[in-house]
Amino acid sequence: MPGRFVILVGKPNDRAADRLGIIASRRVGNAVARNRAKRRLRDMFRRREPLAGPRALDVVAIARPDLVRAAFADVQSDFLAALKKLRGAR
């Protein structure tokens, strides 16, 4: 699901928990910016409330360039909204 700061793509898996993969291309910025974007996304994924559902998801988060400069709360709300839409879409 596309968002302003992150795009999420997901597929059901046969595990008990969700898994996260992150893509941060050079368009996000230099190595420092890409690593910061990945750290932020991992932290948001760990802090989220587990959503009820019959199956877990494999989620791929694609960082967009504005993610690094945006406020953490804005990025987190965008991430959680996209994750909620992704859960409802499957």
Image: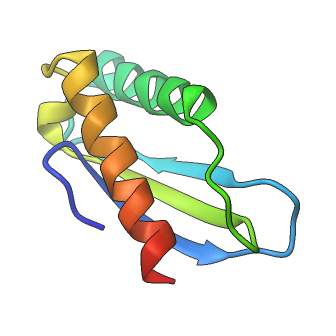
Q: Position of residue 66 (x, y in %)?
A: 11, 34
Q: Is residue 38 left or right of residue 63?
A: right
- Up the image or down, 58 lies above or below 21; here it is below
- The quarter of the picture where residue 27 lies is top left
Residue 24 visible from this viewpoint: no
Return the x and y of residue 14 as percentages of the image width and height. Answer: 85, 75
Q: Nearer the viewer, residue 12 or 23?
A: 12
Q: Left or right of 84: which side holds 42?
A: right
Which sits in the foreground, 28 or 63? 63
| 4 vs 75: above or below | below
Residue 39 x %, y %? 48, 22
For the point 64% across and 64% down, the residue is: 58
Residue 64 in view (yes/no): yes
- Residue 3, image x and y in percent? 19, 54
Question: Residue lying furthest front in this view?
Answer: 52
Quarter-wise, where is residue 48 in the image? top right
Q: Is residue 57 left or right of residue 65?
A: right
Q: Residue at x 51, y 83 (%)?
A: 90
Q: Is residue 51 left or right of residue 43?
A: right
Look at 42% across and 80% down and name the residue there. Answer: 89
